[in-house]
Structures are given as C-alpha cells and as structure tokens.
Image (cartoon, grey):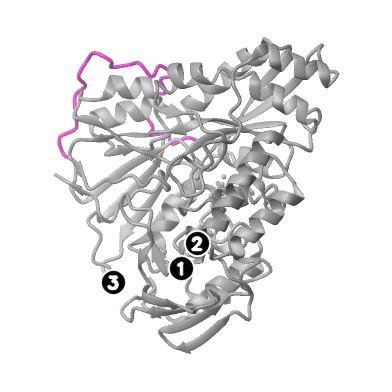
Amino acid sequence: MHSKKLWAKLVMFMMVVGLVLSGCNKYNQETTTPQKNTNDNTNTNEEVEEAKSADPNVFNFATNQDIPHLDPHSTAANTSFRITYMLYDRLVTYDGTDTEVKPQLAENWEISEDGKTYTFFLRKDAKFHDGSPVTSEAVQYSFTRALKLGKSAAGIFKKVIDENSFEIVDDHTIKIKLKEPFGPFVKTLGTVFGNILNPKLAENHGDDMAESYLADKEVGSGPYILESWDRGQKLVLKANENYWGGTPTMKTVNVLIVPEPSTGRLMLEKGELDLLDDTMISPDVLKQMDGKNNVEVVESPGYQIDDFAMNMTAKPLDNKLVRQALAHSVNYEAIIDSILLGGAERVPGIVPKGMFGFNPDAKLYDYNLDKAKELLKEAGLEDGFDLELAISENNEVRKNIAVMLQADLAKIGVNLKINTLAWPTFLDLVTSGKHQLALAAWTPDYADPDYNLWYFAHSSSKGPGFNLAFFENAKVDQLLEEARKSVDEAKREANYKEIQAIMAEEAPYIFVGQSTVEAAKKTWVKGYEINPMNTWYVPFHKITKD
C-alpha cells in the first residue's frame, strides 16, 4: 500500500494493509524540523553544504507518511510493515530482490503428498527480545491470535487454518494441517502477517487480544528492538546484539517523519539523511537530484500498481456504465509521460506484468472521451455530476495524478473534488466505505495473484481487507476460492486470468500503471536492495555506510 503497502498490505493494510488503521490521530510537527519549503525544485543547480560527520553506525531514513500502528496482526499499512519486518521474524522470508521464499525461523519444512500438512523444523538458536526461546508454542500462539483478532492478517489464513490446525511435535517441530490445500501457503508465511510473536503477550490481552498494547510496543525476535517512538516525528530502532542471524550492520536506525518532500530533499543533500522513502519525491525532482550532492537515484523493477478504487456502494458508482465511463476518461499516457516521466506501463488489472497469472488479454481501457460521454448518456447522467476523490497527503506523485484526473473528468462534465487527508484518517475513511473514489497504490507481499486478487476482489476483503471498491461478484469469489484450494498451477493460472477479465469488464478500479521504483540515497549507502514486491521494505540490518 503503497502499497503495499493501507490496517487495512491496514489497515490491511492499509495495510496500510490495517494498509490503517483505526486512528485519526493528528500529530504535532517536530519543532526541530527545517523550515517548510513547498518548492521541490530548490537547489536544482547548486551544491549544498554537506554534513561531514555521518556516523557509519547510524542510519537516518525519512518518510512523509506516518506510522499508524505496530500490531502485525491488525495493520495493513506499508509504513507499519517497514518497521515490523525489522522487529519480528517469520517462518520464511523474502530477501534482497528475490521473490522466492527463503528459510528464516524454519530451517526447512516438508509438505505432505495431499498438500494439506506442512511440517516445519525451527532453528534452535532464535530468541525473543526478552531472551526467551522461539518455540513451536510461539508459532501456534501467533497464528491463533491472528485468527482470533480477525483483522487484516486473518484474511489470508482464516479459510485455510483454524485453532485446531496445529500439532506441536516438540519445542522446535510443528505441523500445520490445512483444512484444504492452499497453493501459495508457504509464500504467505513470509509476509508480515506471518510474524511470530512472543506468547508472553497473552499476559496483556485484555479485552482486545493486546491490540491496543501492541499499538506502540513489540514482542518480536527480529534484528531490531524498538527503542522509542515519538509519534508523528521519529521512531528509533536499536540493533539486537544477540540476533541469531548476526548483529545488524546499522546499530541505530532513525525513521523520521518529514511531512514536506522539499525538506526531505534538502536534508538528504546536506547529509542529514541517508535514504528517502521511494514515494516521497516526484520523478522529475529525482532526475534533478541524481548525481549532485553525493545523491544517487537507484532504479529497480517493481510490482507496484497505482489505482483509483471506485466505491460500488456509493452512487453513482454503483452503475457499471458510470465506472466504465470514468475509466475511459483518464488520459493514461499523459500521466505516465508527464508525471511518472515514462517510469510506468499500462496494465489491465491488479496483477502485475511479470507475475505468474498475469492476463495480457484483459480489457485495457483507452482514453476516449466520446465513449465516456456515450456511456454517461446511457446511464442517464449526460448532464454531469459531482464526485469526491480521497488521497493521502505527503505524496507528490499522487497529488499530481489527482489534479490531472480532475482536469480529465471535467471534460465529461464531472466535477471532482480532491479531499486530501492525513494517512491514518485516509485509511479510516476508505476502509469504512465512506469514500467515493480513492487513489492508492498496491504492492504484493508474495508473488502470487492470490494476494493481489483476494484483497482487491474477494467479497470478504471489502473495507479493511483492502477491497476498497467494495466489489462483490459470486463468480469471482468462486474462482478465487477454487484457485486457493488447487495445487494445479495450470488450473490456478486459468482462474486468475478469468478473474482479471471479469474485473476489467466490471471496472471496480481504474488502474493507472505499473511503476518502476526509484529511490534517492547518499552514495555512501551500500547494500540497499529493492524488492519488486515489498518496495517499501528497507533491509536496515544489511545496509552499510562507507
């Protein structure tokens, strides 16, 4: 959201996915933040005076999107994911630029012939931050808690496992018995929703399974420990010196919330920052920065797709003709050329090009104002109407895309109001279905269409699950559920391609494009890799500074 990731991948999601989440907190700005400058083009031709005392053991990262929540089982916000990936371990993980799972807490595993029983053999040297060992009990506790909590993390697992799915063989061997085969099961275990929590958390369950307790605390075994968090300003991670995977290279990581992109740019150029969030600076400004002031812009293929979700429960978007008309009214090429500077390509749906199951033949809406007007006339709305688009603040690219959409829709008589909201407020609005249109971005946590399509299209994912279009289609639900149960990859691929064709016709979303990932960093930063799925994931524990 972007994301990933909204509490709901917030959200999740939104996550985010929990995308998220609940809160509509308004935080104060840090008084030490440099003076705001709304002009991203400052310092275009001049070298700035650079700080010379960068500590090689301290990494300073800035994002302009706040962190809503730290409970890995209830948030789907990408900004939360970035942190929880460092605080927790999973049975398996994704590493570097690879989209295939690798062992983490599970050294190896076995799968039964019927695809329903998975036996995981845990490493014996992993410990939680309080020194207690990571055991099979912790694995069972973590998944059953996610299911009981019933929020974003449960979306992946609730139809596949339940509280009776676990058999503890010994302290470091556990069997997970699925209710039915689930093709991408191991892949799902590498997501943040598969984070393993210390079962001692049960002492703080209270009335909400410790969700409020974990909002600003952690009980993980990961490479970093949460040292402090000044909401809306700075979160500090300290290296776990006893980490089983080796002591992290960066001893301290400061995650700074810097609302103004121009401020973040200046801080990077001066050497006060080592890396900027890839969503923070627009492509045109990145090109201006590259090669100056010891700033390097790195590029990488990505699975991120920007989209407009059209809430099908809100009039007049409950009418397919209206949705199709809007899809024909977007000047896609102008957005890609003028705003994304060619750093994206058209795709017909939420499954990215390059991923298994991508359907290149699904309907791709063209920019056709005559067709859009014809569809609105057929829908009885030829005289136009008002719409509101919700976007999150502090994302220059999405602001520019929103303004261009506003101009495009005006050409077919639609008056679009842009409602810019703080990230937590935005997530609360869109996951509760109080929006009409919402502009967001999505990157998968595992490289399988199940992830993208389940959250965007299954009826059970409406709202907090990140189906922000509140799309519901019985045939799509059936195809998704069949594909999840199948271990026949050809069958799964056929289902996913059919789903993409149905969604293209129903048009619950407008897909802007699949973007290349670009991020600005100092040249002294080494070991920073961008994963095409988790573009917001930063491997702080492996990064070094020359």
Secondary structure, mark 1, is loop
Magenta stretch, residue numbers: 29-53
Work out whether mark 1 precedes mark 3 in sequence or the reverse, and give the earlier one.
Answer: 1
- State the predominant SS element of the stretch in magenta: loop
Point 47% across, 65% down: residue: 189
Secondary structure, mark 2, is helix
Q: State the residue position of label 2.
A: 188
Point 50% across, 16% down: residue: 334
Residue type highlighted by circle 3: Trp
Question: Could you tell whether 477 is left or right of 95 in the image?
Answer: right
Residue type highlighted by circle 2: Thr
Place residue 86 in its image quadrant: bottom left
Foreground of the two, 236 or 330: 330
Quadrant occupied by the C terminus:
top left
Foreground of the two, 126 or 95: 95
Q: State the residue position of label 3.
A: 244
